[in-house]
Amino acid sequence: MTPKRPLIEAVGLSISFGPLHARNRVVDDVSFRIDKGEAYGLIGESGCGKSTILRALSGLNSDYEGALTLNNQELPKKRGKEFFRRAQMVFQDPYGSLHPRKIVEKVLTEPLAIHGIDRASERVAETLDAVGLGPSFRYRYPHELSGGQRQRVAIARALITEPEILLLDEPTSALDVSVQAEILNLLKRLRVERNLTYLMVSHDLAVIAHICERAGMMYKGRIIEELTSQQIRQSQAKEDYTRDFLTASVEAVARRDEVVG
Ligand SMILES: Nc1ncnc2c1ncn2[C@@H]1O[C@H](COP(=O)(O)OP(=O)(O)O)[C@@H](O)[C@H]1O
Ligand SMILES: [Mg+2]
């Protein structure tokens, strides 16, 4: 067995917003490591800083303190092009993240053109197939797709450059519950098939427990404890806050299961 090694590490990550006299520190000294092939989650209520961490890691926001590393090397604040090929982001809202006037083919060939990757037509067909969409989807506009199909296209767009890392920001939160499960199962299968590493952010504990081996529980910009998916399922938390969050989530899942039947 090959020994585990960290692919991604955050060390003392802090992020603040606002003018100097009224700085608001929304991510406060956060550290975590994600091994190659692992799925790591960040859980916590809305506003606790999850998306802000993802945006810093993805290179969308370079205004942070502390270090973010890839393969034990500190990432430069201004990421190189190769980083954007290797680490791709999937957003919560499949409606907002796809351009309304671009057909799927264009959505998928643009990243290939940017990164100078060949065999565009074959790759589009392969990647659509990998996310469970047939070849006819190439010529559809986003408004001709369901929410779940849109999110499949967004996942295909992320996969087409053959990245190692997916940064997933609440990728199923905007979807109907029945569709959520399909997308989660797709993400689970793709990770194994493509040897991917995930950092997934969600306020939904069931989603994190389904996908991730480990997760950091966030509260007001800090990771207050880390849990394995087994500890999540068995409600084994050290911190009172985490225990309350787990209890509330289990109740929410039960209510949702009643609705779905
Ligand atoms: N660009 C920004 N400017 C000012 N405040 C921001 C900005 N982005 C996020 N925030 C604030 O940072 C906090 C954390 O936001 P966010 O990371 O989006 O939370 P989460 O994803 O956990 O719901 C919130 O209070 C939010 O209002
Ligand atoms: Mg968010």
Image (cartoon, rainbow, N blue to C red):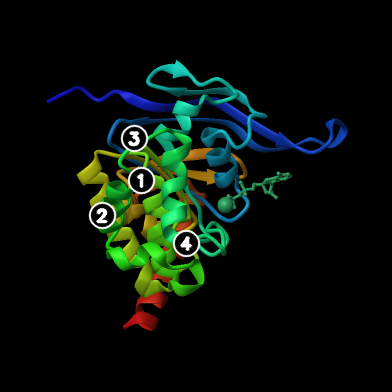
Which of the 4 image quadrants contains residue 199? top left
Mark toward the start of the polypeptide (2 vs 1): 2
For this orientation, the residue located farthest to the right is: 21
Circle 3 packing at 10 Å, graded few (<14), some (14-19), many (20+), is: many
Question: Residue at the location (36% across, 37% down)?
Answer: 163
Quickly name the residue at label 3: 164
Q: Position of residue 136 (x, y in %)?
A: 32, 68
- Between disc 1 and disc 3, the foreground one is 1
- Residue corresponding to mark 2: 130
Badge 3 element: loop
Q: CA distance from mark 1 to mark 3?
A: 9 Å
Q: Amino acid at mark 2?
A: Ala
- Among the two numbered marks 1 and 3 on one chain, the one whose residue lies closer to the N terminus: 1
Relative to 111, 212 lies left or right: left
Q: Is residue 218 visible?
A: yes
Q: Secondary structure at mark 2?
A: helix
* Disc 1 target residue: 159
- Distance from Cα at disc 3 to Cα at disc 4: 26 Å
* Residue at mark 4: 103
Q: CA distance from mark 4 to mark 1?
A: 17 Å
Tell me where residue 259 appears, x and y as whole percent.
Answer: 39, 82
